Amino acid sequence: MSIHITERELVEKREDVILEWGGINAIRKLPWEQIARIEMFDGSPPLGSGCIIIPEDYLPPGKNRRITARTMTFSDWIPHPSPVQFEWLGRALLALWLPYRSRRNKIAASGTSLLDRMKRLRLMVKSSSESASWGGDLWALLFELQDKRYASVSCEKRGIEKMDQVIRILAEAAEDGIMPAPTRPRSKKKKRSGEQTYLRDGGETPVQTKSLPGGKFAHFSNNFVSRLMGICLWMQDNLSDQVIESTKWRRTLSAATTDKCIGKRRSL
């Protein structure tokens, strides 16, 4: 029977592979010939095979465990990919798998979120590569899709945010040398909505909240947290005994009332 590898186990297994290749800084400098030999998962083909299979144990029970759902085949995304496109796709999947610039992802990565990012990338590449006007530059393809807000791919707000995140991860990987740099520098535009990320190798860069109303991931202030903890500790120290006694009293009263009702009913 298949098990479900926890998020912590997934991170530990990923860190083992990274250390085997000398760490992230070493991976950044590897040529494609060596990166192509990296096996992201136990028993999965290496990146250079052009077919990545996420083991079912990395996913919770459900439709994502189907072999067709967790298999990424480059030739399905782009018919007859050129060597440059083949390497780009291999490095892109590596970038999505590596701990990118987010401490949250480093600690709480999941097979489901990884599979979802890979599927988003597949959707963007596959839908646009079928266009007759496509020139073969994958960076240009993604940037054009993003500028048009993925009109030909998705109209769902959450899906658009996730595709923004995928492109941001790949762009950061290009800055770090894991992905090939875009052939043409992109014109500067205002920041997209979505998660702000951290520095990959640690550090204490503060989290920036989402630009959505209310800031979904905004942190409470230190003053608020201190006051809240103070109230909780006061309640624990001053009310816990009374709450326990009150609970015992209510249980005794409830039992007595129940016995009395049962006796009354039997006497009828």
Image: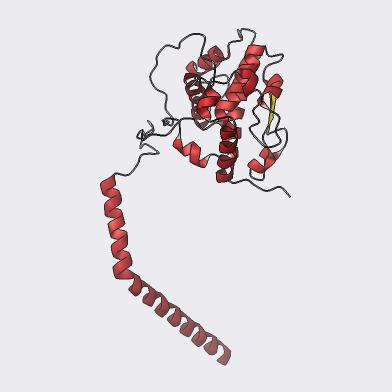
In-front residue for pair 108/196: 108
Residue 12 x/y as whole percent: 56, 42
Work out whether residue 268 can be spotted.
no
Is residue 137 rendered to the left or right of residue 207? right
x 71%, y 47%: residue = 2
x 58%, y 44%: residue = 9
Residue 241 x/y as whole percent: 34, 74
In this view, 34 is above or below 205: above
Is residue 213 rendered to the left or right of residue 55? left
Which quarter of the picture shows residue 5?
top right
Most extreme residue toward the bottom is 267
- The quarter of the image holding the C terminus is bottom right
Residue 21 x/y as whole percent: 59, 30
In this view, 79 is above or below 156: above
Which quarter of the picture shows residue 199?
top left
x 56%, y 34%: residue = 19
In-front residue for pair 263/178: 178
Work out whether residue 117 can be spotted.
yes
- How many numbered badges does the structure rendering display? 0
In-front residue for pair 92/201: 201
Colour basis: secondary structure
Which quarter of the picture shows residue 44?
top right
In-front residue for pair 66/87: 87
x 52%, y 89%: residue = 264
In this view, 12 is above or below 75: below
Residue 26 x/y as whole percent: 53, 25
In this view, 129 is above or below 114: above
